[in-house]
Image: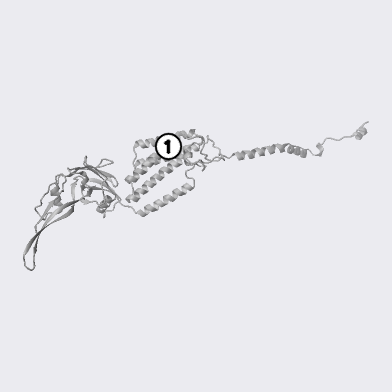
Amino acid sequence: MPLSIFAQNVNPKAKQQALLKKAEWSKLAAIKLATGVQDSVVRIKNLRTQLDSAKINEVIAIKVFTQRDIRLFNTLYINGFPIENLKPLKASDSEKIIYFKLDKPVQSQLLSFLERTPFETTVVPVYFGVGANVKVNLTVKDTTVIKDPLTAIAKTVIKDTTVQVERGIIAKSNDPVYVEVKQKIKIGWVYAAALAVGMIIVLGLFHDMLKDNSNLYYSLANTQLFFWTVLFVVAYLSICFKTDTLPDIPLSVLAILGISVSTTAVSKLIDKNPTKAPIIDKNATSQGLFVDILSDGVSINVQRVQNVAFNAFFGVLFLQKAFSTNLLPDFDNNVLLLLGISAGAYAGLKNTEPAKEQTEEPVDTLEDRGEIAKGADKAQTASPENVDNAANAGAGPAAAPPVTDGSQTDEAAP
């Protein structure tokens, strides 16, 4: 049965048909013959590090040498296997670069390669390729010989049919990319950890965790440490839920937590300074979280406003990057220096502020001073009577002066 296949509009720029002479050729070979095999991967780079290595959830940029539209290369291949349900993030036809994010489908494919290998974290050399999963219309001319069973007369029937064939790999790389792969974690343990952390946070908030030692005013240092702790926990657990893996912790995240802890420690030391001798004001009340952390009890301070503004701004960026990339953000040194200077300015100028944070109640409070004054007055009033009574009790009858009258005087006269 002769079979002829005509390729229609396989290459949109050339717009020519190629006739296949051998019917036993595969459909993939037919597409390659029609489109050409000149396409190749020139370079693969990690978009973040610009190196030939990558981690799960990072983005790689694949530069392709081709004359066709780069948007046709919408399928990523790993060692010859297509990755289903993975769409490119971006395609630049002018630069012939297409971007893919190595997320869950890539991780699942790599884990299947290492199914029988026990590991926690390993690096796998991967050969990437790009292709197109758009379907190509092919016209098939099928020549069939039909024989009439009654007359035994053979009749040739030629029928044209159109079939759709998916394209295979068009361009592949000859150099490996080293991808770090992590084993998946049990998602149930992540839910248990999230529940435990949530209960601890709620318990701390109900017990005035954000206030100073007198539990009266909200403390800026405590609030800053709590703010970054919550951001880190939320981002970390979110990535665990989305990727089923434990994310790496960049050094910049540890530096930010260290700045918050140092600010809290310095603030506590200044509050404990005995030279300030704070006195409890029984009529003092908190004015709310934002006013307390921005004010020193008298007015709003610029160093406090700067510290709150910088931490809030970079905190929002931290969450945005974590949610969009499923990676803990790695801030550069300039951001860390900015946060460190702001925290240092607040801690350094805190010693010049009034004693708003009332750390412990003095022994002689205002009420005690009033009671002592009343007792002193009573003691002074009663002291003369006590002295006279003590003197009379010690002298006795012999000490009394002699009593004389007129008769005694006359008798005594000679």
Disc 1 residue type?
Asn
Instruction: Determine whether 270 is above or below 117 in the image.
Output: above
Quadrant hosting residue 282:
top right
Q: Is residue 404 left or right of residue 249?
A: right
The answer to whether one can see residue 369 in this image is: yes
| Residue at disc 1, secondary structure | helix
Label 1 neighbourhood size at 10 Å, few (<14), some (14-19), many (20+)? many
* Residue toward you, 14 or 412: 14
Q: Position of residue 411 (x, y in %)?
A: 93, 34
Q: Is residue 101 left or right of residue 66?
A: right
Q: Position of residue 48 (x, y in %)?
A: 28, 41
Q: Position of residue 357 (x, y in %)?
A: 51, 39
Pick out the residue farthest to the right: 414
The answer to whether one can see residue 364 in this image is: no
Name the residue rendered at 35%, 35% in the picture: 334
Pick the quarter of the image with the C terminus.
top right
* Residue toward you, 209 or 148: 148
Instruction: Determine whether 259 is above or below 128 in the image.
Output: above
Instruction: Residue under label 1, please give it.
Output: 307
Pick out the residue farthest to the top: 414
* Residue toward you, 215 or 414: 215
